[in-house]
Image (cartoon, helix red, strand yellow):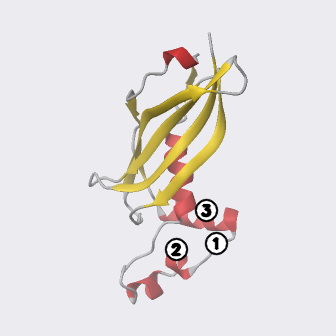
């Protein structure tokens, strides 16, 4: 992790970066359930899941989001501020043993209310080891101008 100043003018539409991967573990399921209180059987009951069409435990969508977005934090930009996330969808399930990585593409730029700032949208796709998109969202940024 390191700091790199990237100003509004430096962002280019369609620029893309790809993170390293991260394998999802049973410990991730247990820790996330403890943090959130979400102990639904879909995530925690291996035997019950065997009786369901999906056949195995499914990762918490919020955990996949948290880990996938965490992977993008390899570069800290002191010139940008996160405004939040839009259009998040859980596209495919993630299971114990799956390895995910994130692909981030600059999809939009615009003007902000403050003329010293601009808006940038990063389209985020979280992808499993089979190349399947498992989660998608847009990260909204407010970025200083030069």
Q: Residue under label 3, please give it.
A: 32
Residue under numbered circle 1: 38
Q: Nearer the viewer, residue 112 or 142?
A: 112
Gap between marks 1 and 3 measured at Cα: 8 Å
Q: Distance between the residues labelled 3 and 2?
A: 10 Å
Residue found at x 37% / y 59%: 98
Which circle marks residue 43 in the picture?
2
The answer to whether mark 1 and mark 2 are in CB contact below 8 A is yes
For label 3, the SS is helix
Q: What element does badge 2 sit on?
A: helix
In primary-sequence order, the first of circles 1 and 2 is 1
Residue extending farthest top: 146
First reached walking from the N terminus: tag 1 or tag 3: 3
Q: How far apart are marks 1 and 2 (CA)?
A: 8 Å
Tell me the element at label 1: loop
Q: Is residue 78 visible?
A: no
Report if the CB atoms under discs 1 and 3 are less than 8 Å apart. yes
């Amino acid at each position: 992790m390191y700091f790199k100043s990237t100003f509004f003018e430096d962002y280019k539409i369609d620029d893309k970066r790809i993170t390293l991967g991260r394998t999802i573990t049973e410990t991730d399921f247990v820790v996330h359930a403890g943090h959130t209180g979400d102990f639904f059987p879909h995530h925690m009951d291996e035997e019950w899941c065997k009786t369901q069409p999906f056949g195995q435990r499914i990762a918490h969508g919020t955990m996949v989001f948290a880990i996938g977005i965490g992977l993008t934090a390899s570069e800290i930009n002191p010139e940008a501020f996160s405004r939040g996330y839009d259009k998040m969808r859980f596209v495919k399930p993630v299971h114990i043993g799956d390895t995910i990585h994130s692909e981030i593409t600059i999809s939009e730029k615009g003007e902000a209310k403050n003329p010293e700032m601009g808006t940038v949208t990063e389209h985020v796709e979280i992808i499993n080891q089979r190349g399947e998109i498992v989660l998608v969202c847009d990260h909204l940024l407010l970025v200083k101008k030069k």
